Structures are given as structure tokens and as C-alpha cells.
Image (cartoon, helix red, strand yellow):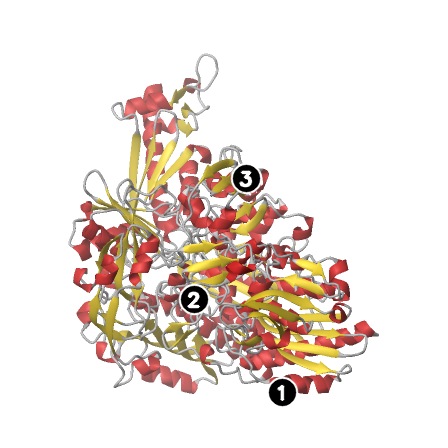
Amino acid sequence: MDLIQVASVRTPRSRDELALAPGEVFLGGGTWLYSEPQPAVTGVVDLMSMGWRSLERRPDGGLRIGATCTLEELHGISAELGGTARPVFAEAVRSFLAGAKVWRTATVGGNLCFAAPASPVPVLAAALDASVKVWGPGGKRRIAAADFVTGVGQTALAPGELVRAIDVPASSLAARTAWRKAALSPLGRAGVYAAGRREASGRTVIVIAGARTRPGALRFERMPEQGELADAVRDLGEWFADPHGTPAWRRAMAVRLAEDVRSELEGAAA
Amino acid sequence: MRITVNGRSQDIEAQPGQVLRTVLRELGHYEVKRGCDAGDCGACTVLLDGRAVNSCIIPAHRADGREVTTVQGIGTADEPAPVQERFVAAGGYQCGYCTPGFVVMASTLGDEELADLPQALKGNLCRCTGYRAIGDAIAGTRNTAPAGISNGDPAYGQAVAPPAARRVVSGEEAYTLDKDPPEGMLHLAVLGSPHAHARVVHLDASRALALPGVRAVLTAEDSPTVRFSSARHEHREDDPDDQLVIDTVMRFRGQRVAAVVAESRRIAEQACALIEVGYELIPAVYDPDEARREGAPLLHPERTPADRVDDATRNLVIAFDEGDPRDEVEAALASAPHSYSGTYRTHRVTHIAMETPAARGWVDDGGRYVLRTSSQVPFLVRDELAHVFGLEPEQLRVLTGRVGGGFGSKQEMLIEDLVLLAMLKTGAPVQYEWTRTDTMSVAPTRHPMRLAITIAADPDGRFRALDLDVLADAGAYGNHTRGVLHHAVTESTEVYHWGKKRVHVEGVYTNNLPSGAFRGYGLGQVMFAVESAIDELALQLGLSPAELRRRNMITADDRFIAETFDDLAIGSYGLDQCLDWVEAQLATSASPSWEPRGLPLTTVSRPSGPEWAEGTGLAIAMIATLPPRGHFAEASVSVGHDGTYVVSVGTSEFGNGTTTAHVQFAATALNTDASRVRVRQSDTDVTGYDTGAFGSAGTVVAGRAVHSAALGLRDRLIEAGAAALGVEAAACVLDADGVVAAPQGAATTSASGQPRRVGFRELVEALAPRTGQVTQKASNDGTPRSVAFNAQGFRVAVSRATGEVRILHSVHGADAGTVINPEQLRGQLEGGVAQAIGSVLYENLIVCDGVVETPVLRQYHIPQYADLPYTEVFFADTYDLLGPRGAKSMSEAPYNPVAPALANAIRDAVGVRPTTTQLTRDAVWALANGADGGSSAGRVAPL
């Protein structure tokens, strides 16, 4: 929808132009920003003009996902860039309530910063133990993906900061992954996510999200037993209530999906 | 910036913050629709550099230098593309508002997308069809007769494509706002109340008025003082006079505080934020049971029974008892060996017609106020505006374009009064268009109800008594509550013999958003309780659910109680056929080798394993074929020299398909091809009166008027032809080329042996030498009324582990009398079933302390392609003695039996009775596991 208070659109080409004036916000794809009235927004700074590369291999073997990488590009990530973990990228994108038309416009950085329980990118980033590269008025810094989302719609970003990229370490790309989503309808807005990764060493991470106000990562040095995992999931707490599921159902689904992820990872390693 | 649209490159200036959709419509590309304005529904789908996007969430500045293709770039009505022809052939739409988006999307589907069609289509929503017909369009299935080609059969009973078919699929059919705006048109925006109950004690609009471009701010001081109801019926006295155009008392969140009229929508909305308002808060009440108790805050303390508010001191819009004396009913219940009592709740759902309400007004050359509006009831809007504003009806003209869906939502005057007020104040043309969120937070919803029911039976399963207590949440205003509640307890209970019957009904004001007219008009809520209770009693009695119904339902020989339903009769009876068929279908799918069928290009698996349980359920429904106490329609049919006919009729077309039916009535009566009949409709100036398209009346009332007019015109043409030929009228017939002497008898053929014929030119010259146009009028007063019947059956698989309800088999039997158009009837049935499945399995308008927590489509989930089953339909073989050519209406009806049939199937599967219509996965999971449904503030419904 038209953003009625927006009086300026800036299309920056360099870092120097990224300082926000009062009332300005960063614009990623815009699929959320332009979907609701934004009475406090008087200007947008369109990051798509920065020309950041969407997907690239880092010298250390890791993967850099540019903040302006579209969900469509992430969905179609090549085998070379995605490694063993490749299927999880497409799974994450397919979990999106919106379809391919929106994937074409929506960005990875935008979805990460939106930070709704239903947002798949924070779950993906946490499951891959990615590092979020942040630019801000105070310089550059990194935030561990698992710590990035701090609440419903809330992130660790300070005012004026933006996400430049999500860096996935090589060890995560070489891991086995599994992804599950539950919703109140077959392809509906996510109410629960369980995503997991198992490295060759046996180190296993299972992230529970959607059902909680923010993603919760469970870390194990070896593949957990079924009961051990279920207890750990139940203990996470912070079960979330909104129109996409009651807290009790979400908790039960989290336990179920976590077990699905565990057994898939266990089977994959065998 | 430079943009290329459908191959034409142009320089334009987009405003900051604008989206591509706005730019395209400003360029006159009205084929790009505004459905949700949030990227959820896909009505605005276009190709951007060849790839489908939702243009409502594409920042306009990003289209610079790029190429846009709209549905018009894919093909036009004159030169449709194959994909558009497929939508016509399949009948792949009803109201058609979502169709341009679907056509654009369909044009992009390759093998990969077709392999997972539900995923590919999840960004395009249709509210009318239930998607089967859209799937057929994509799969290339033909369901309708080729447009414009005569096959020699009478049009009646054929799957004739709607006359607007090619215009709809090409985006050329004009909906309310799809015309160039009048010169100097202003835009209106409303400031809504942030409080559910408050008095406006201070209002300062000076800052808003100072904003450049603002032309007026309308407040309560500008409002007429005549009270009215937004609900519209033939008799304005049917609804309570409890609303003002702008009031100083706010009774629900979002109610109009003030309206700004400005040169653009943007300025008007900006100015709303500059109005300073002081409120004095009043205690609010959100639970109707609390609201009717002593000491509750009163919403309309000054209203009296003369205003049609039964007891304002208890917030009762309406309260009544019906049936036998209480002691007799109680005695019958007490003495019956089998009885069941239960309390049921129906949750709040809303219509989501894809076109949001919109109206545009201007003054015509004769100084009259003209309103083009998205209404099911243009004549009733005209009359009520005249009443409220103290004008003569002749000073107003109200018309509609094609209307993008209704379902009851547009049987209300929700926007037109403000547009007229703004025109009177500014003297300029004014437009007011609702947002999707307006339709979900301010528009009337379906009435939530609480139903306490007791039924009892003999050992042989004969019902002995029914005791029913209904409590309904009217919301802040009484619009439709009286009608809905009277209707709610009628056909829902009259379909059975009860022995003794008592009904107590109360509709209560609360500070929630208003409830209003919704498909089924109250019946579905009561049927949920009745049809659930009957299943429980069948279990007690050891009878099958179908058999218990059969032993108690009305038969073809029954009569309705005369004093209550003086003009209601069983004009035809197909309930037994519907129930038998549904029961037989469900028996078929009991076989382990039976495999479910999904929507086109999808598969449905039949799950097994310990977590899954299968069950079946069914329910029946009856509905009067039109509303009671008068529903009037006038129609005329004209013919000119070229032998093409024009039907003029007041009925709006919003996907109900009545336009096609009217064409078929006329074409068949006049023995011509459907392509030679045009329809002019829904304009208070150029067509005769019509009470409106609600209560499924378009087919029956206006249909009878059209049919009578066509038959009258036929007789006049034949008489004129017979006179010219010098033969008896009885020896002549009318065909597509004129009047021809029937082939029997020597005098009817010419010397060459050819039948003797009089062409239209000569006929029209004889009958109307001055005007060149022969017109026959007819009218219908909507009485007597008949009843239509429906039965729905489901086989479901329920997962105890997740609460998923997978519909394996959906079967719907309908008795609509003779079938006017089998494809349209099938579409109405599928669409009604689909909307009801959405209501039960997915949709829930959550209102917490007066605040709607689900005001956007991503929170209020209407069914996607992925969400719906294939529904098999059956048409009972009946001929209605009261309907036009034996037909009955069938628009609202299929919605009603669905919720109880689904609940009964879930009950059968998991062994626990659902007592609410909200059967989302979390609710079914809690039901199946005996778990606490969970408490979240957002999930607590007032009822």
C-alpha cells in the first residue's frame, strides 16, 4: 500500500549514504514495510541500490548471504554454494506464508530483521550458527544469529544499524540438516519451527522457533536421545500466543517436530 | 521515471511511498485490482520484466526502466489469449475480481509449478469458487458451452458461460472504481474511534483544515439527525434506527469520529492524524451475557421499541419466544426416555468479498446526486439516503458496476451516506474506498451465537421436544440482528417434526464491532447446534445419523404452520434424495480400496497409522428461497430491429450468476441464442425496481419477472407476426430470426415451400413504429415462497497428534428445483461449501476487549488452493411449482450444513463432541487429547 507519510526515497550507492535522517527507515524488499500503514515513516533508504552480492563463497569456505539477497535467490541456491546443507535453504523459503511472487521481492535481511515468530530466516540462521554482519553509525560488528532476535519483532540491532550479510560457517554447510514447520493450515503462516543440524563430529543443534517469542537453540555434543530432547524442548518455555496457535498446541508440536528433526538427522548420519 | 506497460513506454512521476499498483491504476490500468493492498491476495498480480509480482507491495520507484505486463497485455476481450479462453471455458471465476490476478499468475506456470499447484497458487486468493473451477481452467478442462455459439438447444438448463466472461478474464469488466474519475474528484478518509465506548467531548479540526488540499472535515455537527440502520431491507422498519451518519457517542472501536475530504487519498489520510479529539470514556461491555444483566453499561439507553429496540435497559435489540408453552415443552422433555442437552458456540467470521466496499459520487447534468457503489441493494440505498438526508428519491441515482463479491457484506449502507454528506458539503465529486483492514475491523461480521439446546425422543427415534435458547452478539449496532435472529430459528428447526418446541432468542448489544448479514443469515449457527445434537441422540438410540433424520424430517406432504409462515410452502421436495445420495456416497468411501480425490492437479493421501482416526458426518439444511414479507423486482425485455434483446433488471451481479440465469430465462422464452440477449442492470435510473440481491432472491424474484416479461414479449411478437402472415397466432412460433408460421398446414408455407416468416424489422415496425423498440415489462412480488434443501457429508481423517483434519471425501446434495445452469449451480455449491470449510477449519476473527486482533489476511486465513477438498455435487430431480420454470435459489444454502457435518465427522473420528464451530488444528488437538485448549488473551472469544 502507499505509505502516505513518506516524502523521500533515497537510493544509496555507498556506505556513507546510509546514515538515517529522522523518520527514515531502511528498505529491503519492502514486502512487509509496504504491507501495513507506517505512520511514523517519512523516508525510505532503499538498500537494494547498494549492489551487494546475494550469495558468495567466502575465502574461509563459508557462505555469505547478502542482506538484499531475495528469498527466491536463496531458494535456488546452487549445490556448490549450499553444500550438504543446501536443502534447508529451500525448505526455509517454502515455509514462508507468501508465495513465489513475494519471494521475488522479499529479502533475507528484511525477514531476519522483521523477527516475527513466523519468520523463517532467523530460524535458518540460528540453525546454521551463522554470524550476522552489522553496519551502523558506530562501525561494523557481528552478532551471533542465535542471539539476534530478542523478542517478537525485536532484534539486537541498535538504532541506525543495519544487517549487511549473514555469514554461514563452512562447518555448517558441511552438516546434515533437517527442517520442519507446523501451521494451522497446510501451507499457512508458521506456528512452529524445528530446524536442526548435525556435524560430522556428532555435534547437534536443534532450534525451536515460531512457537516461542524468539528462536531457542538446543546444543548437544552428540545426538540426543528422544526423551532427552523432548525434555529440553519442554523446558524452553516462552511459548507464544497469537492467531496461529495456542501455546499448548505449539509446545506439543515443538516436541513432535523436534523429534522428527532428531530422527531425520540420526537417520542421515547412519 | 520511465515505465513500459503492455509494450507502451511512458514517462511518469510517482510520488514517494507510492506502490506500483497505484501508479498503474492512475495510468488507467483498472484491470489491476486492489484486493488487500498488503501482498496477501494477489488480485493486483502483474508481470514485472516477465515475472509475476504483487504490484501492491512493489515500491513504485523500483519500476523505473522496467517492463510491466498486466492481464490486458496478455490478451483482451476481443483477442483473448489461450489462458484466458481456458478460464472462460472452465467457468473459472464467479465475481471475477480475483480473476485478472489469477490469469496473470496462470500465464507463468510451468511444469515445475504445475507439479505443486497449491504451492504455486498460495499467493492468489479467491473467495467465491472454492478453486475447483480455477484448477479446471489451469488444467484446460471445459465446463461451459462455447460463448456465442448456438448449439440449437434452449439456453435454459445449459452450462452457458456468463455474458461478461471474456471481459472478466481480460480485466475489462468494470467494477465500482474501474472508470475514469469525474473531473475534480475528492477523496474521503475516516478517523476511527480508538475507544470501544466513549463520548466525543472535544474536536478541533483546524490543523487538518490547514493542510493544503483538505477541502472539508465532516463531524457530528455536519451529520443529519435522522437515525437509521446500515442494514437494508425492503421495509426500513425491519431494522432498528440506532445509527447516525456521524455520532458523538462511540460504541465500538473504529466507529467514525470524523471524515476528511481532500484532493487526494494521501492528503485525506494525513489530515485525519491532525484532528484533535477529546474523549470521555464510558465503561464497555464485550460479552453479550454480561451485557444483558442488570448494571451493565448501556449502549443505546434512549432507544425504544418504537425504534425497533426491544429493551434498551438490558441492551436487548431483540428478545422473543416462539412455540409451545414452557410447561408443555418441559413435560415432554421430562417424559421422553431419551434426551440430550448441550451448549454450542459459533465463533466470529467475516465475509472477505475480494472487492472492498467503495463508492464514488458526482452530480449529473440534471443536478442529481449519482452514486456508483459496490452494493447488493442499490435501490434500498437510494431510498434510505433520501430518508436520512431529507431528499426525494428522484434526486438520487444509485448504480453499480460489477460487484466483487458480497456474501451479505454489501446488504448494508456502510459508505454511501458519507459520500453523499461529503458531496453536499463540498459540491464536488467524492470517492470513498475501504481498506481490507476496514472490512475486517469495522464492517459487520457474522453473528457469534451461544446455543443451549435440549432435544428428546421416543425409543423408536421420534422426536418429542426441542428446547432452544439462543444468545447472539449484535455488536454495537442492531443492523440485521432482528432479521437474522428471526430467520435463524425458522428453517433450521422447521425441517423436523419436534412434537413440542420452544425457542427463546435474545440479540444483545455489546461494544464489539457490529454483526450483520452473512451468507445463511443466522440459520447456519442454529443448525450447528441442532444437527450436532441430533447426532448425539442418534448415538444414544443406536440409530444411524441419516436414519434418525429420516424419521423426523418434513416430507413433501407437510405444511408449514400458517400463522408464522403465511406464504411459505414446499413447492418441491428433494430433501430425501439429497440425504440418500450423501449417505450412499459416504458408504462408498468406507471401502479400504477407495481413494480420495483432490482439487484438479493435486492428490490427497488417505493416512493410516495409530495417530489417525477416520470418521464420517453429515447434516441437512432447509432454506426459504427468498426473504419473507415482500421482495419486489421489476424487469423489462426489449427487442429492436436486429433481433437482439435487452433485459433490464435491478439485480446486481457480484458472482451470484443471476445475470447468466436471466439471460437463460429470456433466451429460452424467446427461443433465441443466449449470445443475442444483453443485460442492463442495477441502476435506479435505467432499470425497474429491485429490492436487492440478497436472501438468494436474484434467481427467484427477478428471475420470475424476467421470465414473465420475456414470455409477454414473445406473445406480442407472435401476435404481430401472425397478423402479418394472416394466420392464427397458435400456428406461429418465434425463433431467432422472427416469427415463423409453424410447418403444419398448407397456409403456413409460401409457394416455394419455405415456411413463411416475418423478420424483426417488420415486427418491430408493426408494434413500435416510433421508437423502434418493443418493450415488455413484468414484475414479481416475491410471494409465495418455496424452500430449498441441502445435505452435506464428509469423510475426514483426524490426527490426534497434530489436530489436522484432512477432508478425504466431501459430498453435497442440493435441491434447487430444475437446474438453470449446471455449471453455475455447481460453482455456487462448491463455493458455499468452501467458504464454510474456511469458517470452521481456518478462519477466526479474534476480538479481544473490542480490538480485532486479526485485521489482515495473513492473520485471518481464508482458504487457499491448498486448503480445500474436491466436493462432489448432486442435483436432486425436482420441479418447483412456485419458482421460475421450476427453479429454486441456491446461493446461501450450501454454506449452512457444512459446519455441523464437519463437526459430526470429527466427533465420529475422535469420539469427542466439538461444541464450537472453531475447529482449527490447535482446537481439534485439544479436543482429541482432552487437553486444555490453551489460554491466550487473543484466543478468548466473548461468547
Q: Could one spot residue B584 in this view of the protein?
A: no
Residue B439, relative to residue B799: is it above or below? above
Dot 1: what SS? helix
Pick the front one: B575 or B942:
B942
What percent of the width, then of the height, locates residue A123?
63, 71
Label 2: which secondary element: loop
Q: Position of residue B483 (x, y in %)?
A: 31, 65
- Tell me the crowding category of disc 1: few under 14, some 14 to 19, or many 20 or more residues within 10 angstroms, Cα based: few
Q: Which mark is residue B855?
A: 2
Residue B334 lies left or right of residue A66; in this view the side is: left
Mark toward the start of the polypeptide (2 vs 3): 3
Residue holding disc 1: A235
Label disc, if present, on residue B155 of the rendered structure: none
Give the residue drawn at x 48%, y 41%. B2
Do badges 2 and 1 share one subunit? no
Quarter-of-image position of residue B387 = bottom left
The Cα atoms of the two marked residues, 1 and 3, are separated by 55 Å
**Badge 2: chain ID:** B
Chain on which label 3 sits = B
Residue at the right extreme, as displayed: A270
Question: Tag 2: Cα neighbours inside 10 Å, few (<14), some, or many (≥20)?
Answer: some
Mark 1 falls within which chain? A
Q: Which residue is mark 3?
A: B74
Quarter of image, res B912: bottom right
Q: Is residue A125 left or right of residue B464?
A: right
Residue at image location 40% in from the left, 65% down from the top: A40
Residue nearer the viewer, B853 or B80: B853
